[in-house]
Amino acid sequence: MSQRPLRAACCVAAAFLVAGPVPQAGAEPANPAAPAPAPAPAAPAAPAESVPALLARLQGLYQKAEEATEAYNATEVALKAGQEEERLRTDELGKARSALDAEKALAGRMAREQYQGTRSSLSPYARMLLAKDPQAALDERRLAAREGARRAGVLDKLTRNKTAADALAARARKALETQQTLAARQQTQKEAVGAQLKEVERMLAALTPEQLTQLGARETENTDAAQRKLLDSGRLPARTGTPTAAGGAALRYAAAQIGKPYVWGAEGPASFDCSGLTSQAWAHAGRTIPRTSQEQWAQLPKVPLDRLRPGDLVVYFPKATHVGLYIGGGKVIQAPRPGTRVKVSPIAANPLLGAVRPDPDGAPLPEFTPPPLPDSATAEGDDTGYSSEESPTEASGASEASDPSEAAETAAETSAR
């Protein structure tokens, strides 16, 4: 369709809209003096979203971001392992190819010697037949057998080295392909985390100062109520015991990180996410534990809540997407979520899944002096910022700390990382 008829059609349609509908034949003309019809009543405004609904929505966004972060962390671990595998295979392949080149050179030299020998003199077999006495014939036979064995050995080693080099080349290619697949997956997960945090930012930007205040107040109330409920239940130890030597070292390391910002995917030294903090704390205590909260929950021995000791890891949410380090007295050190800093929090600040112990065979110290904690560590920033897809279930002593639909949430400004 040409542009001129299209513009003409638009002009006609505009004139029709301005002039109003054309009266049909036989219809009475409109009375210009008649009053204009009353406008249709406006649709009722949608009710403002309640504070609990805002909390649930914001918590859901944070929980998705947390899950995406831990998925990213798991892929990062696999990618590092793949990179190391690819490096080892490449080194092995280089050594195998060097050995193969050396065997090829030796085989070539032997072939030249054999060719030159047949051109310049009699073969060992001919010399054996023409020997002047039986002893000389036996000597020639031994020399011929030794030379034949030497050549057969070189050819056999050459064949085996070539087979090994081919196998290593295939494994190196596979390791590289795996690494490339993991790198692509990690990039996708990185974009997913960014998208989730952008959603959080957009929601927070739409809230009024009054709503922010209400959310903060609701968070404090719910966290305090959840903590009282847990303490009154008797599910925690009656008194705080002592950690093992490794647990004490992990606790001191975690305490030294208080005040550093949460950054998703970070494992120090300037910033941390939740599992980055716990894994690094125990690494500095001399024990390697899994990087992600899900693997920490899956691989480390479970411990009932009433047997918690300082240094144990407290895991949250049905999918084990958050973790903190127990310090005793119903408190944990944790990196709560984007927009917050490493801090001391009530153990019931998030819905509990259970607890694990990185050093189940360790003996508690006879005595232990806890590291000093900043005075503001328990009051600066919020704790929750997450939601649960279902009620937390008890597992190995785990207990429900709070109703996830009523879990507290602050609206502190979050980072986009």
Image (cartoon, rainbow, N blue to C red):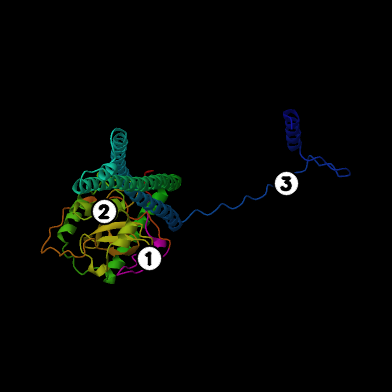
Amino acid beneath label 1 = Pro
Q: Does the magenta run of residues contain 297? A: no
Of 342 and 66, which appears nearest the observer? 66
Question: SS at mark 3?
Answer: loop
Residue 325 drawn at (x, y percent):
25, 57
Q: Name the outermost residue toward the right.
A: 26
Query: Gap between marks 3 and 1, in whole Å?
Result: 59 Å
Q: Which residue is mark 1?
A: 392
Q: Where, quadrant-wise, is the N terminus in this rendering? A: top right
Query: Gap between marks 3 and 2, in whole Å?
Result: 72 Å
Task: Name which quarter of the figure residue 332 lies in.
Answer: bottom left
Principal secondary structure, stretch drawn in magenta: loop
Specify whether 133 is left or right of 202. left
Q: Is residue 406 above or below residue 119?
A: below
Q: Which residue is mark 2?
A: 279
Task: Name which quarter of the figure residue 348 lies in.
Answer: bottom left
Q: Which residue is mark 3?
A: 37
Residue 246 drawn at (x, y percent):
17, 58
Specify whether 316 is left or right of 38. left
> Within 10 Å of the Cα at label 1, are there few (<14), some (14-19), or many (20+) other Cα atoms?
many
- The answer to which of marks 1 and 2 sits earlier in the sequence is 2
Amino acid beneath label 3 = Pro
Give the residue displayed 24% in from the left and 47% down from the top: 141
Q: Are marks 3 and 1 in contact (CB under 8 Å)?
A: no
The residues colored magenta run 390-410
